[in-house]
Image (cartoon, rainbow, N blue to C red):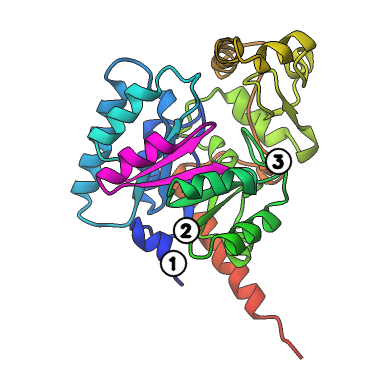
Amino acid sequence: MTFQNEFTRSLNLKFPLVMAPMFLASNEAMIHEGIESGILACFPSQNFRKTGELNDVLQRLNEKLIARKGSPGNYGVNLIVQKTNSWFEEHLEVCVRNKVPLIITSLGNPEKTIKAVHEYGGKVFCDVTNLTYAEKCMQLRCDGFIAVGQGAGGHAGPHPLHLFIEALRNNYPGIPVLAAGGIANGKAILGMLAFGASAAYCGTRFIATTESPVSADYKNAILKAGMDDIVMTERISGTPLSIINTDFAQKIGKHQNFFERYMSRNPNTKKYFKTLVQRRGWNWLEEAVKPGNYHNLWCAGESVELIDDIVPVKVLVERLIRETEDAFREINSIRVE
């Protein structure tokens, strides 16, 4: 059984599944395994911030694609295009130089990225959480959308995913839409395809893999948590972020105080203050993924409800494909009378 569409064919994929980019939780080993499994494996550029590190990773990935001689599997890079990202200019230049097949933009104006990537024939998909921002991205000629809905890990959106996907498809016919939020098994993947998505965008499920570099405590927290244990906090990045409701998460709180809100909105201070807030949040997250850290602050989506084991990436992808096929057969066994 094969699941092919314009999106999978354009990026040479075996199956319409994307390993979503995850800050601190995506590493090079996961990307290599994802490529070999025939899916689109993505990572945030900010996971490789040392001088020359991102360039070296991209060169190795491109060499891998060449060595595979057209076998299914590909990769993409997530760029934070917000002005507060001090690595943006450097990372964009490195990605353009290495002709990354797909760039995913988040949190900002993607105009510069779209223009630069289109010059070498690459594709740019934009994270969107509402139709207003989707329209802005479409006006800039993005190639597709990441529909970030309720229940997603990281910066989740406000809308139920099935409604948001259909709204995007109705407003922008023919534009690929990737479904992000609450996807952890084959039934969910098949459901997203039925709603009109070109592929499922799956992040939290891949944290609980053997190749993921995060601590055992983080992975075990994914296994133990349920969907009611996921909360949204503004304290990490200034934008609501999905995390597991640990003691430290409760300590920092869900909302910015009056001073923080004022500084984040004041035209004279917002850029610098947001940068400080994000750097503090990144420091919290970086410390939390290390073994033995007591300030447990772990990003995750509501799909934790359905995750109960830690397996290699290849095993997980094979399982997800098999589950999708089984779900398809189950639906087709229903008799309509």
Taking depth in this image into account, of 21 and 105 the one nearest to the observer is 105
Q: Residue at x 78, y 32 (%)?
A: 229
Q: Position of residue 74 (x, y in %)?
A: 34, 49
Q: In the rendered image, is residue 316 in sight?
A: no
Q: How many marks?
A: 3
Amino acid type at image mark 1: Asn
Q: Which residue is mark 2?
A: 16
Magenta part of the chain: 101-128
* Residue 118, magenta (yes or no): yes
Q: Quadrant of the C terminus?
A: bottom right
- The answer to the question of whether label 2 and label 1 lie on touching residues, with beta carbons closer than 8 A, is yes
Is the Cβ of the residue at disc 3 closer than 8 Å to that at disc 2? no
- Residue at 34 percent of width and 30 percent of height: 92
In the depicted structure, whether residue 332 falls above or below residue 181: below
Question: Which residue is found at the position 56% from the left and 12% from the top?
Answer: 287
Q: What label sits on residue 5 in the rendered view? A: 1
Badge 3 amino acid: Glu
Q: Quick one: SS at disc 2?
A: loop
Position of residue 301 in the picture relative to residue 325 (left or right):
right
Q: Classify 270 as above or below 195.
A: above
Please report whichever mark, 3 or 1, sits nearer to the chain's N-terminal start.
1
Q: Earlier in the sequence, mark 2 or mark 1?
A: 1
The answer to which of 9 and 316 lies nearer the viewer is: 9
Residue matched to label 3: 302
Q: Position of residue 34 (x, y in %)?
A: 40, 45
Mark 3 or mark 1, which is nearer to you? 1
Which mark's residue is nearer the viewer, 2 or 1?
Answer: 1
